[in-house]
Each structure stands twice: as structure tokens, then as C-alpha cells.
Amino acid sequence: MLTPMIILAILITPLAIAFAYASYRSQPLEVRRPACYGMGLAFAFFAIGHFVQTEGMVAMLPAWVPWRLQLVYLTGVLELLIAIGFFLPDYRELAAKLAIAVLILFFPANVYAALHGVGLGGHQWGPVYLLIRAPLQIVLIFWAYVLCLGGRFSLLQRSS
């Protein structure tokens, strides 16, 4: 269960540093940038997992999924691009939208891994792991939606 704690620490650290800095300088806290940095670091962590724990990631997918190894690498690249987007002001909004989509679309792989006891990042705990993973997914989606997008979401146009 260490992985969810690492993810939360990665997510929160830039915001905590910004809060400490703003308090020290007696300035208002600007939340969006450090919140996006936290998501960027979290997605970089996710992407690294695809390249370091490749076989474990492949095992998280059902056998009927074609090109599982290539899919793991491709999704790792996608998560790395999302991570980079969170650090670039012009791409933060797109990165947040893609992050939300990825978190929703990839969740079935976590369900499959938990139900089949795939031993990666807590999934070996079986279905009980979903009691931690599902709320973590909700936190990540909430973080991207509220803190990075400011509660706005439109696929057709950029928000100001």
C-alpha cells in the first residue's frame, strides 16, 4: 500500500511548498500552478512505472487485449506527455482534460488487476485494494478538475 501514499505525497508536495512560501512572504497562495505541478509529477511517476514495471503492467491487462506490451509502452508515453503538459502553461488545460480521461479509461485495468490479484502496486491485495484505489482515482480526478481546470471542462473550446 506504499504506492498510493507515494502518489499522494508527490501530488501534495508542490502545493505544500507553495503554501509555505506564500505564508513566509505573506502573499496570497496561487493554487493552480503548484497543483498542476503536483499532477505533472504524479503522471511522470505513472509513466516511469510503465517503463520500469513493464511486465507487471502487462499482467494488469486481460490476455485477450492485443499488443499488451506495446500498449503499456504507448500509454507510458501518453502519461509522460500529459506530465510535461502540466508544466507548460499553454498546455495545462489540455493536460488536465487528458489526465481525467486517462484516469477514467485506465481504471478497468486496475479493477481487473485487483480482481485477479496481479501483484503490482497493491493489487496483490485483491478486491480490497479497490477500497483504496477507487477513492485515490476520485482524488486525482477531483484535483485535475477543480485545482487544474478551475472546475471548467469543455471539450470544444478553451476556457479563459
Image (spheres, rainbow, N blue to C red):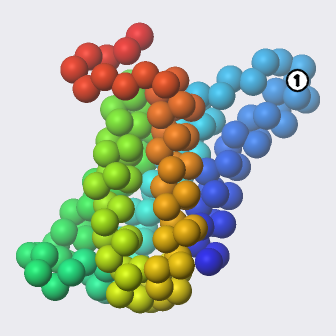
| Residue 84: x %, y % from top left | 41, 44
Left or right: 107 in relation to 29: left
32 vs 110: above or below: above
Residue depicted at x 35% and y 87% = 116
Query: Could you tell me which quadrant the N terminus lies in?
Result: bottom right
Residue depicted at x 68% and y 48% = 12
Left or right: 52 in relation to 17: left
Residue 100 in view (yes/no)? yes
| Residue 82: x %, y % from top left | 36, 46
Q: How many marks?
A: 1
Q: Which of 141 and 160 is in front in this view?
A: 141
Q: Nearer the viewer, residue 159 or 127?
A: 127
Residue depicted at x 21% and y 63% = 74
Left or right: 27 in relation to 113: right
Mark 1, residue position = 25
Left or right: 135 in relation to 63: right
Q: Find residue 61 and report its image quarter.
A: bottom left
28 vs 31: above or below: above
SS for callout 1: helix
Q: Find residue 117 and report its image quarter.
A: bottom left
Question: Callout 1: 10 Å neighbours few (<14), some, many (20+)?
Answer: few
Residue 95 in view (yes/no)? no
Query: Could you tell me which quadrant the C terminus lies in?
Result: top left
Residue depicted at x 35% and y 36% = 97
| Residue 101: x %, y % from top left | 31, 45
Q: Residue furthest top?
A: 160
Residue type at numbered disc 1? Arg
